[in-house]
Amino acid sequence: MTGRNGGGTPPYGDSAGGPPYEGGGGAPPRQDDRSAGAVRRDGAAVDVAHAELLAALAGRPLVTVDRYSTALRTGYTGPAPVESLRPALGIGCYSAWDPALPGMVVAAEDRTRTRSVAERHGWLRRVRHDAARHLVKLDRPPVISSRCAGARLSELAGPGATVAAIGEGVRATIEARHLLDDLLRAAGVPAVARIRCVPAERLPGLAELRRAVGTERVVVQARGLGGGRRGVIVSGDADMYRAARLLGPYRVAAYVDGWPCAVTALSVPDGEGGVSVYVDRPSHGATGVPELGVGPLCPAGRDWSRPWPVPAAALLIECAERIGVWGWRRYGVAGLFSVHALLTPGERVLVSAIKWRHDESAEGSAVNQQAVGVPPFTLAHLVVMLRGRVGWLADPQEFNQLSLLRATERGGPFSVRVRHRHESPVRVAAGRGPGVYRLDRDGRLRWARPAASPAEARADQGEFLLADLPGPDVVCHPGADLATIEAVTDGATQPFHGPASASPFTRRVAAAIEDLCHPATRDAGPCPG
């Protein structure tokens, strides 16, 4: 495995005005010597991380702009919470709940009383005016924490604000599907971890594509960002018609049967011209799970509790290390990113995508860091984006070896997405809202207690956290998110039984969530779009 390596120029975050590091420009301060640093398992790491984030914020309020207005919640609730990570203002699509409340919340569904596919992708324009009014009331220009930077976000943030996210142009290049194979080669990812693929400006016939990649089924992905919405599994002419509707250029890859999987990583400049790459334990995923309302190539959740074969886990961690070093050397980027792959029945790992941002699995993956006594990666990511000092992380080699060891063990957190899979709009019956639940003997949901962290729900004891459950006045249209099932298990409770199959436990909980739903009244109106 690689560790501290590489040279590069610092410019990791996008600033909407003014330098992101108030102590001055240039490279971040040199990190503490980690050569003898074991993973710190006491409260010292939390105290140091809290102080370093406060120093990086330099009195500026922290604001999150994310679909989930409770973004970062695992870090400021649950085990060893870091209160400086609680935002002063949360701007999002879905409502917040206690104890995950930011200081103030602007949520699109509080205004529209609607959940739908269109709202999920266009919520920011619904709240921009309300959000702008709250932003101008802050006593100082804020630090905006978001998955992605961009012109719309910078405009919302206003003069003097700092957007703590990777620049849109660099991210678009790194995440572009049609450039993936070239990027992996440049990063030194071994050929054994790369899927056979070809780039294409225009799509030729199916027979030619099959010959090019050597499989009967092929996967056509468009150049843009995102997941399943820009990919089609092609088995015949009808699928080719759908693929041709995507905007090229394209990446045409061999279809690989296996578990979707991913690993979250964090790169931190070491102050000596290189970068240290920390890699979380790998997860299994699932896509195309009909009973959860999730279509082909769309993620249904992540599971860190299923053990990995050692060679496969070691290779995926090594790939993440190489990509992190390459990103620093080539573009000077650091912070959170994830590497997506497929784990085949023959225990091979094949890299399928890179996302240079913190993604929707951040709340679940944070539990892994807390389990070994350190704050979530998201906290260090913010400090790196602000060109601050991160002194609480151990030696990267040691941390990654620990991740490899834990990947071979049973048990860990998981998260499962449940969407409305029927054709008519529904509302969720009045109840207690998000929190920890159990199932009674009749398979109905029973409230247990308020909570916001997956670590607060023990699946092996019959508990689970329902996050982002809509209120009874919100109309949920087909395809809308109904909730996320989150918990920690010792391995006895599995969320998935296969790459596209929910376990009996997950099916029972999803059915209980659907039982809460009843048809929306006629005043629900058409699905917005």
Image (tube, grey):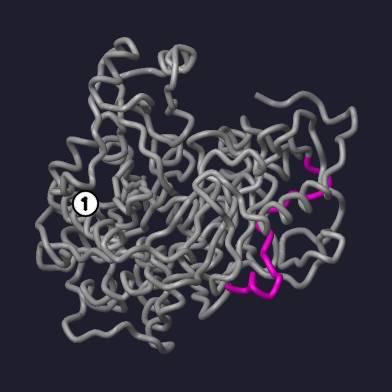
Residue 484, position in %: x, y?
A: 63, 54
- Per the image, is 472 magenta? yes
Residue 174, position in %: x, y?
A: 26, 40
Residue 496, position in %: x, y?
A: 56, 54
As displayed, is residue 440 above or below residue 497? below
Q: Residue furthest front?
A: 346
Q: Does the rendering let one see residue 141?
A: no
**Location of residue 210 by image quarter:** top left
**Location of residue 23 by image quarter:** bottom left
* Kind of residue at disc 1: Ile
Give the residue drawn at x 47%, y 71%.
Answer: 410
Instruction: Return the residue nearer the eye: 81 or 457.
Output: 457
**In the shown orientation, is residue 292 left or right of residue 205?**
right
Which SS class for mark 1?
helix
The magenta region covers 455-474
**Location of residue 120 by image quarter:** top right
Instruction: Return the residue nearer the eye: 460 or 36.
Output: 460
- Per the image, is 463 magenta? yes
Report which residue position mark 1 lands on. Answer: 323
Give the residue drawn at x 21%, y 51%.
Answer: 323
As displayed, is residue 302 above or below residue 390? above
